[in-house]
């Protein structure tokens, strides 16, 4: 059973890879035995401009307000396309993805968006550590939980909308 750990930040990915035991480093990810460790670098997706939904929204006007499309979407950020492609390719190689985003609503959403947009259908677990010391990281690794237990956090971040 190989796993892909997706951290929110490259620095956390490096710490996780060291914890798992780096076998080799590749461009954008670590190989740790049968596991892979990579990261996002902030939000990889963003809401499109209003004209994505309707050309009449290109120019701001009271007449077109409120803008309420049938369904809101998020699209890959231009500078994130390569990272999204890499993470999607890595997900094809594993049976388990581990969300190792920061232990907060945004961290949950950030990684979940990548997993959902890649249409990953395997098992998804949650790595939860609010500290980066070795003892905390080891404890979190021993207590991986079902990622669905954190859906409320993802939904709360999604309801607030993009930050940053």
Image (spheres, grey):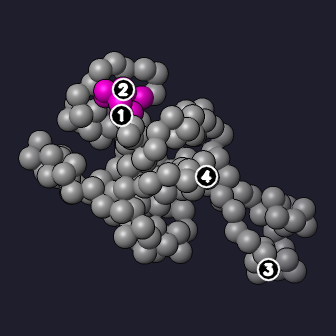
18 left or right of 75? left
- Provide the secondary structure element on which disc 3 rests: loop
Which is more N-terminal, label 1 or label 4? 1
Q: CA distance from mark 4 to mark 3?
A: 33 Å
Image location of residue 153, percent across then percent down: 40, 71
- Provide the secondary structure element on which disc 1 rests: strand
Which is more N-terminal, label 4 or label 2? 2
**Vertical comparison of 146 with 133: above or below:** below
Of residue 13 and residue 41, the one placed in the foreground of this image is: 13
- Provide the secondary structure element on which disc 4 rests: loop
Q: Residues within 10 Å of mark 2 (few under 14, many from 20)?
A: some
Residue depicted at 37% across the width and 70% down the height: 149
Q: Which residues are magenta?
A: 29-36
- As drawn, the residue found furthest toward the front would be 1
- Observer-side mark, 2 or 3, equals 2
Image location of residue 139, percent across then percent down: 14, 52
- As drawn, the residue found furthest toward the right would be 56
- Residue at image mark 1: 35
Of residue 144 and residue 50, the one placed in the foreground of this image is: 144
Q: CA distance from mark 4 to mark 1?
A: 20 Å
- Residue at image mark 4: 119
Residue depicted at 49% across the width and 57% down the height: 112
Tell me, yes or no, whether the highlighted magenta stretch contains residue 143: no
**Vertical comparison of 8 with 68: above or below:** above
Which is more N-terminal, label 3 or label 2? 2
**Vertical comparison of 34 with 9: above or below:** above
- Residue at image mark 3: 65
- Residue at image mark 2: 31
* Magenta stretch: helix, strand or loop mostly: strand
């Amino acid at each position: 059973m190989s796993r892909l750990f997706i951290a929110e930040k490259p620095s956390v990915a490096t710490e996780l890879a060291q914890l798992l035991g780096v076998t080799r480093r590749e461009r954008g990810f670590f190989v740790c035995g049968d596991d892979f460790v990579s990261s996002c670098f902030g939000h990889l997706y963003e809401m499109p401009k209003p004209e994505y939904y309707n050309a009449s929204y290109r120019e701001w006007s009271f007449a077109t307000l409120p803008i309420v499309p049938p369904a809101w979407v998020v699209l890959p950020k231009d500078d994130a396309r390569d990272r999204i492609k890499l993470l999607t390719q890595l997900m094809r190689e594993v049976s388990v993805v581990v969300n190792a985003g920061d232990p907060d609503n945004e961290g949950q959403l950030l990684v979940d968006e990548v997993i959902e947009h890649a249409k990953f259908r395997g098992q998804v677990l949650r790595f939860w550590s609010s500290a980066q010391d070795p003892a905390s990281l080891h404890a979190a690794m021993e207590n991986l939980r079902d990622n669905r237990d954190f859906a409320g956090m993802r939904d709360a971040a999604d309801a607030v909308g993009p930050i940053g």
